[in-house]
Image (cartoon, rainbow, N blue to C red):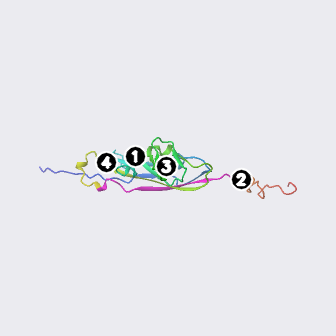
Amino acid sequence: TINARVIVDAVADPPILTAISSTTVAAGAAVTGGTLGLGARLVDTDGSEQLCAVDDTQPSGFACGNFVMISGLPPGFTITGSSGARTLTGTDVWIVPAADLPNITINPTAGFTGTVDFEMSTLSQEYNRVLSEELDLSNNIAPDTELSFSVTWQAAPTPGGGGPGGPGGPGAAGPCGT
């Protein structure tokens, strides 16, 4: 009989982020996370990992407990629809609970038109209940996973501004009404 001690080293797996790469909506319209296909999930589902967002306001430097970070919001834009969503003061960065992603709403400033490029990121952290048994802590955080997506807020066409039925377009009346 041989007695042997087996040590298993926990290693964090990179998380999976999802989003529709490009979406167009009406000028100034709010857009939901569901419309944008926003999602974040862990690969390792045994309960030993959690999603974390970089958060310099936290002593550890991370907001852990299944959070993601969304950046790129212009001044005046907000995220609503999540009681846990918050902005990092003085930045364009929002920390959002991953479970709330389909329910959030990105609210532009009134009448905003243009394209905004957003970035969603998170990392996974292996959190062991008994750290004294962990031999190598350096692999307990998977590298940051990032995903970009854009939203274009487009002004509605101006009535009579050309095109079918507009001035000069097919179906336009001539000087004699023909």
Determine crowd level at label 4: few under 14, some 14-19, many 20+ residues with C-alpha closer than 10 A.
some
Which tag, 2 or 1, sits closer to the chain's start?
A: 1
Q: Which residue matches tag 4? A: 127
Residue 6, percent from left and from top:
20, 51
Q: Nearer the viewer, mark 4 or mark 3?
A: 4
Residue 111, percent from left and from top:
63, 50
Q: CA distance from mark 3 to mark 1?
A: 14 Å
Q: Which residues are magenta?
A: 138-157
Q: Amino acid at mark 2?
A: Thr
Q: Which residue matches tag 1? A: 66
Q: Amino acid at mark 1?
A: Asn
Q: Secondary structure at mark 2?
A: loop
Q: CA distance from mark 4 to mark 2?
A: 56 Å
The single residue placed furthest to the right in the displayed view is: 176
Q: Nearer the viewer, mark 3 or mark 2?
A: 2
Determine crowd level at label 2: few under 14, some 14-19, many 20+ residues with C-alpha closer than 10 A.
few
Q: Which residue matches tag 3? A: 38
Q: Which residue matches tag 2? A: 158
Determine crowd level at label 3: few under 14, some 14-19, many 20+ residues with C-alpha closer than 10 A.
many
Q: What residue lies at 14% left-to-right and 50% top-to-bottom?
A: 3
Q: What residue lies at 50% left-to-right and 52% top-to-bottom?
A: 19
The single residue placed furthest to the bottom in the displayed view is: 168
Asked if the residue under mark 2 is in contact with the one under mark 3, i.e. CB atoms within 8 Å, the reply is no
Residue 154, percent from left and from top:
63, 53
